[in-house]
Amino acid sequence: MTLSKGGKLPEASFVTMGANGPETVQLSERLKGRKVVVFGLPGAFTGPCSTIHVPSFIRTAGDFRKKGIEEILCISVNDPFVLKAWGEATGATGAGITFLGDADGSFTKALGMAFTAPHLGLIGRSNRYALVLDDGVITAASIDKPGECNISTGEHLLAEI
């Protein structure tokens, strides 16, 4: 699949931490009738993910909301326990960013965004991307080259809309 303007994401189930533990989230239900930002990255507690990518969406969350974005979703090939801890540690949870775990990487593979860097210990992870969706349709897409964190940042995506 190609992530581009006018496209739609495949149906997917994710896991997030709810008040009573792990909960399943259906992507189509989360996107239906709403304007949402979705960004994907290699993994929780990794270098650029923690120091560049997630902070860029924390900084721009308010500006996205002013443009009508109702929710910002971060998708990572991690379990919901790690993502909960990472969201709290980075301040992203407090900024209203929702972390969704693509625990088996099936969504990431369906997007054609699978990324592997064995020398870094990253196997079956996600390449970086950022999307704006309106009722499930991609209205803006920024996809980085593998190993880079340049155009999938909050600031770059915000400038695209």
Image: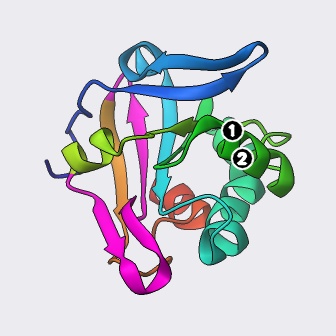
For disc 2, the marked residue is: 61
Q: Are marks 2 and 1 in contact (CB under 8 Å)?
A: no
Q: Amino acid at mark 2?
A: Ala
User: Relative to residue 149, is residue 56 drawn left or right?
Assistant: right
For disc 1, the marked residue is: 81
Which label sits on residue 111?
A: none
Asked if residue 128 can be seen in this view, the reply is: yes
| Of 3 and 40, the residue lying toward us | 40
Q: Residue at x 33, y 71 (%)?
A: 116
Image height check: is 84 above or below 46? above
Separation of marks 2 and 1 at Cα, in angstroms = 23 Å
Q: Residue at x 63, y 70 (%)?
A: 46
Q: Quadrant of residue 104?
A: top left
Q: Does the magenta stretch mainly form a helix, a strand or a loop?
A: strand
Q: Amino acid at mark 1?
A: Phe
Image height check: is 22 above or below 59? above
User: Relative to residue 133, is residue 89 drawn left or right?
Assistant: right
Badge 2: residue crowd in 10 Å (few <14, some 14–19, many ≥20): many
- Magenta stretch containing residue 156, yes or no? no
Q: Nearer the viewer, mark 2 or mark 1?
A: 1
Region of the chain picked out in magenta, as a range: 112-136
| Of 30 and 46, the residue lying toward us | 46
- The image shows residue 155 at horizontal and vertical percentages of 61, 65
